[in-house]
Image: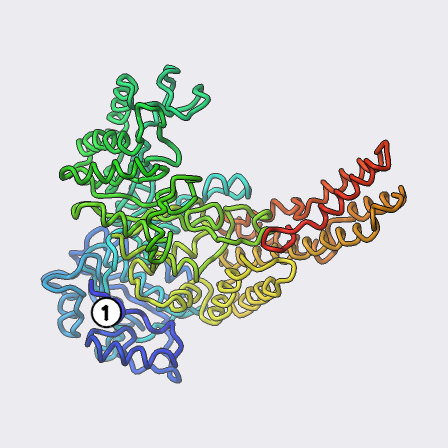
Amino acid sequence: MPASQNQATTPTRFMKPTQNRPRLLAVCLGSGLILAGIVCWGATETNPPAAIHSILLVQEPQASAVERRIGQVLTDRIRSQATVEIGVDSTRKPGADLYIHLGRVRGSGDLQELCAKHKVQLPGKATPNPEGFAVKTVQEGPDRVVIVAGADDRGVLYGCGEILRRMRFAADHVELPPTDVSTSPGFRFRGFSANQGGTMLAATKARHWTQTELQGVVLDYALAGGNCFYCEDQPGPLYEFLKSFSLMTTTGARPNRLSGGHPKEWTAGGREAWEGTQWVCPSIPESRAALLAQWDKDFAQRGDHDIMRFYAGDPGGCNDARCEPWGKTFVHLSEEMAAIWHKYHPKSIVLIANQGLDNAGERAIFDYYRAQPRTWSYGIAYGPGSNPLSPYFRDTDLRDDLFVYPGKGPVDRYLAEMLHELPMDQHLVNYSDITHWIRAQYQIDNPEPNLVKAYNRRMFHVRPKAMYKIFQAIMPFSEGDIIYSEGNHDEFHQYLWARLLWDPNRELEDVMREHCELHFGEPAADLMVQALFQMEENLVTPLDTNPGIARYYALVKAAGVTMSAGRKQRDYRWRLHMQKAALDQYLQSKLRRELDKERRVRGVLGSVQAEPQDAAIAQAIAILREPAETEAMQELRNEAGQLGAESDQLHGDRNLGYFKLQTPLRNLPGAIELLEQAQSAKSDEERRSALQSVINLTNRKTTSGRRE
């Protein structure tokens, strides 16, 4: 779909009025396309939409089971936010405050007649674009009507998402501003992962989601525009749920992974301990035959997934001399596996993920594709460890030649190179890691070291500016993204990806405000947008002197005050932010307290050139052993703990940092150990050396000039 069309149909109610007028005028003059937010009901900023206490959902008799399921989602979600009367019928009956006509476009029927009468047109040239929809509010005599028309089943679902994002919810009614939208997605693949993460669950002691909660998270991302999801390999409850909404599913395999035992001599090169490992060398005829027999049995039992991905690494691979370069062995083995996969799932597409390869392996894959058409392959999934311009997964063997004219640098230069190398029938689909902030595909270059120590890489966080910039850099080369996630701590990034994969031309602040209105309510939206921006700044700002820590806490706290009682009572996202804010304040106080202890110890010890005194050493040890917490810190810890218990009860989510608060930010245990060595030293020289080590340790700074 042309970029201008998505620009024209960007929802405008999430922008400030002073921003709306110039942008809308420019779009109107430049494209002549339908604009979002055209006034059809006569509402204005000073004359808001009338309250809606009753809704009738109208679905035609020929509506499919999927359409009816989507209608149920719409009614359930409205009911979960406000106490309103909602009915469902096949025709419009008098008495409702709002009528929602919902369904797929067909050659005939009431919905088709409404679309023709009110000039509702789906995007597309000769035929409607796949997955597109149109939503328009109109007045028919005394009836307020919303037309929601989808090009297909998924289009109907996305139209429901548009309605839910635009509705304003009160305790006993809803409001719906005038709306006129016609849009379809900008990218073919928009894949997401609804999961709690096994490591996160174990570390935070959170409860498992119920099946209903898992389905709710899936629908969150689907309503935002997602069309492809991770699920069980074999048909199970989540797989069946996804298929019941005509959503796509993805699965994967690591080609040289052999389940069960195997002879020692089959063990893949680079695997030091063979016992218990599942990785074998596929260049050994017997192990290759065992692999293919295993995959034949495995693939026969899997569901009809729409996408299969074969991973070269992370983990996996073999560096036995017979397999070098691994990229060549991997792609030929993938071809054999694809034939087996397509035997059972002929409509599925196959991607290979070029993770953890060296330059020779990458070259072998390009040569393989260039040699002749490879109809079994749709293309390459580009993910963590796929970039030879990044040291992530590689200590050496970087593509230095691509830094000569680097474009935007490592973030997108290799994607351009891959498109140059691949034939036209092969495509790129991103496999982006949006879940980690350190030691990751798109990691922060200079993270705040104390936050790194306190939270590690699976931290609840947001990076709106950075992620927006990354998205805009990488997506021009790809047909979409099937993201990588290790939990629900990245839910904002998943929402951002979903909305930008639908329309990459949207402004960051626009998407952020939409997200915050949807999840925190309109009164709290501005405060939460500011809070999200502040959290990102806090990730790189020195912790001990950062006023942004207090500001983030104050913004989230103030947002909670503005939220309605009902919304706040059920909102786990606000609690996750409040936990992070309380924990960050705790950590800042902890760091300041530890730094103060170190300063006082250095003052007590003075110059080690003078005669060391046992009393001074004992005093220094006593300082370091003073209580780790102040009363204010205990209150913050208790606040975070209570909020974590509530978010766990509400949604099975809590902050990992709460369980790591005992970890010192400074090496106070090491300083105590050195002081005890000084106490027991047998000579003044040994004692002075130990004390100098204490002074050096407590005065140590990071390479960036900040204390560790």
Residue 136, above or below 457: below
- The residue nearer to you, when weighing 47 against 617, is 617
Specify whether 376 is left or right of 415: left
User: Which residue is rendered at x = 56% and y = 49% of the image?
Assistant: 452
Q: Which residue is mark 1?
A: 4
Specify whether 537 is left or right of 230: right
Secondary structure under tag 1 reads: helix
In the picture as drawn, the residue positioned furthest to the bottom comes out as 46
Q: Is residue 191 visible?
A: no
- The residue nearer to you, when weighing 288 against 445, is 445
- How dense is the environment of label 1, judged by Cα within 10 Å: few (below 14), some, or many (20 and up)? some
The percent position of residue 477, horizontal first and vertical second, equals 27, 54
- Count of numbered circles in the view: 1
Quadrant assignment, res 106: bottom left
Question: In which quadrant of the rendered image does the N terminus lie?
Answer: bottom left
The percent position of residue 676, horizontal first and vertical second, equals 80, 37
- Going by the numbered disc 1, the residue's amino acid type is Ser
Residue 305, above or below 103: above
The percent position of residue 326, horizontal first and vertical second, equals 31, 31
Quadrant assignment, res 544: bottom right
User: Which residue is rendered at x = 49% and y = 53% of the image?
Assistant: 445
What colour-coding does the image apply?
A: rainbow
Specify whether 667 is left or right of 525: right
Q: Is residue 660 visible?
A: yes
User: Which residue is rendered at x = 36% and y = 35% of the image?
Assistant: 313
